Amino acid sequence: MLKLSKITLLALFLLSTAGATEAPLPPPEYQIPLHYLAADEAARMLQQLYPGTTTRSFRGKLFARCSRQSLNTIEEFLDQLDTPPRSPSTRFIELRHEKPHRIALLLQARFADNPQVTILPDNRTNRIFLMAPPVLLNLLQNTIRDLDAPDA
């Protein structure tokens, strides 16, 4: 019979468990109350804007799997969007660095499933025409400003 010292046994045990680490627990899932915004629309939007967050809608309710800090940010964002429907606002945004059709294509792809948003490039005047609810219009305008930066 082979006899091993206590140190040898301890070393073998440590070597055998060295790669066996427990997988980290996933972040908790929170239900986010919505009053006006459709849960499936909110889930799609959050998946695009917050890639590290897992969202889903179930029976008209929105669920997000994320950190507590991310949840606070998401709730603040959704508070601005979850408002009673209003008539759309319009705005022309003049571009300084980019071509209108390039930015319009990017935005149209992102908001293709939202019938409340209209994005039209005007290459002749180097502007983009926007029609959307006021909160989304502000989001679109800020996004265009970021995309039209000289080093974008």
Image (cartoon, rainbow, N blue to C red):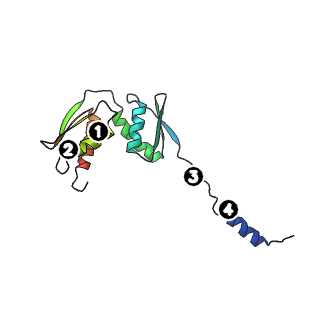
Residue that label 2 marks: 100
The alpha-carbon separation of the residues under discs 2 and 1 comes to 12 Å
Query: Left or right: 36 with respect to 6?
Result: left
Instruction: Say which residue appears at 32% left-offset and 37% top-offset.
Output: 111
Query: Left or right: 112 with respect to 22?
Result: left
- Which callout, 2 or 1, points at the residue further toward the start of the chain? 2
Q: Are marks 4 and 2 in contact (CB under 8 Å)?
A: no
Q: Nearer the viewer, residue 125 or 149?
A: 125
Residue that label 1 marks: 108
User: Is the C terminus in the top left, top right, bottom left or bottom right quadrant?
Assistant: bottom left
Please, what secondary structure does the residue beneath circle 1 have? Answer: helix
Q: Position of residue 96 (x, y in %)?
A: 16, 49
- Which callout, 4 or 2, points at the residue further toward the start of the chain? 4
Q: Are marks 2 and 1 in contact (CB under 8 Å)?
A: no
The alpha-carbon separation of the residues under discs 4 and 2 comes to 58 Å
The alpha-carbon separation of the residues under discs 1 and 4 comes to 52 Å
Residue that label 3 marks: 24
Please, what secondary structure does the residue beneath circle 3 have? Answer: loop
User: Residue flagged by tag 3: what amino acid is it?
Assistant: Pro
- Which callout, 1 or 4, points at the residue further toward the start of the chain? 4
The alpha-carbon separation of the residues under discs 3 and 4 comes to 17 Å
User: Residue flagged by tag 4: what amino acid is it?
Assistant: Thr
Please, what secondary structure does the residue beneath circle 4 have? Answer: helix
